[in-house]
Image (cartoon, rainbow, N blue to C red):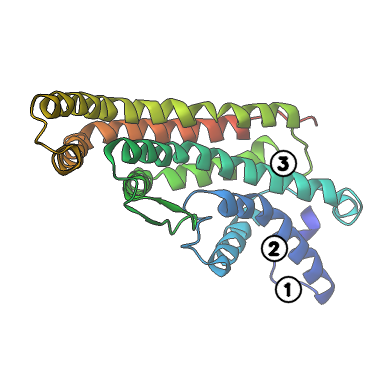
Amino acid sequence: MQDLVGISGTSLQSISVYLMLLMVSSLRIGAFLVASPFFGSRMIPLQIRIVFSIALGLGIMSQVEFPSLNILTGASLLPIIFQEVFVGLACGMVLSICFSSVILAGEKIAATSGLAFAAQIDPTSGAQSPVISQIFQLFLLILFFSLNGHLVIFDLIYKSFDLVPIGSFYEFETLIEKSIRSSNSLYYNAVIIVLPIVSILFFMNLGIGFITKSAPQLNLFSFGFPLTILGTFFALYFSVDALQFVFSGLINEAIGYVKDILEVSPNG
């Protein structure tokens, strides 16, 4: 839209048009911020997310091409809004699904080691979760930001406006299929994280069972329970390096799913 390039010297009648363009350009990134793991959590106030999405929308607005005013002011605006929100939510939900695998792994480790009672309110979701799950989640977020994963995601969303401009519609069946496919990583990565630690705890419980069977005066709860918790702490401590590589692979896999979604071919 060549007649709307540049905001200086804008007439009063064009302000509503610019506001509408700003709203449309902020929908995709704003919907992503609502559904993403960190930016969509309760730790980030809604006002900050709105200001952040508008600020990013201002940068997107000056670089993307919009359809004609006849389309934006007609009934075609509703499908465009629905698509932009749907694509942003899909990217955010895929990232949340991949990141939820560490929460599931922490819950299974806590249930096996007897640390399930050590739970508190998760500030990201508002639900009650074990402390191990929250430690895993914070560890993953630290790696995600230290590897500039958030910048990679924002860059992918920015480039998606070139692949599928505003007004060109996605193949929603393919997009939904690729989004659902990411749910496989939830249990797959959770098993990879849980299996070594749970295997160590299994052999520890087996040894404690032999000891309490041979020496009945040793109470299972007074002897085995503290030993299992201590073994869990040692297993987690010596697994930090291995968990770092697993979490890095999980981040790359999540970014790959988001990239796969944003590269869906348009219908035209």
Crowd band around label 3 with a 10 angstrom C-alpha radius: few (<14), some (14–19), many (20+) = some
How far across and how far down the image is residue 97, in percent? 52, 38
Q: CA distance from mark 2 to mark 1?
A: 8 Å
Q: CA distance from mark 1 to mark 3?
A: 27 Å
How far across and how far down the image is residue 224, in percent? 17, 37
Q: In terms of secondary structure, where does tag 1 sit?
A: loop
Residue 220 occupies which quadrant of the picture? top left
Is 95 situated left or right of 231 in this image? right
Of pointers 2 and 3, the one earlier in the residue sequence: 2
As drawn, the residue found furthest toward the front would be 217
Question: In this rendering, is residue 202 above or below 20?
Answer: above
Q: Amino acid at mark 2?
A: Gly
Residue at horizontal 46%, vertical 28%?
Answer: 187
Asked whether disc 2 touches disc 1, contact meaning CB atoms under 8 Å apart, the reply is yes
Q: In terms of secondary structure, where does tag 3 sit?
A: loop
Which residue is more in the foreground, 153 or 72?
153
Residue at horizontal 80%, vertical 74%?
Answer: 11
Q: CA distance from mark 2 to mark 3?
A: 20 Å
Check residue 9 in the rendering and tell me which mark sits there, or answer none: 1
Question: In this rendering, is residue 165 above or below 3?
Answer: above
Of pointers 1 and 3, the one earlier in the residue sequence: 1
Mark 2 highlights which residue?
6
Is 11 situated left or right of 52 in this image? right
How far across and how far down the image is residue 15, in percent? 78, 71
Q: In terms of secondary structure, where does tag 2 sit?
A: loop
Q: Amino acid at mark 1?
A: Gly
Q: Amino acid at mark 3?
A: Pro
Check residue 165 in the rendering and tell me which mark sits there, or answer none: 3
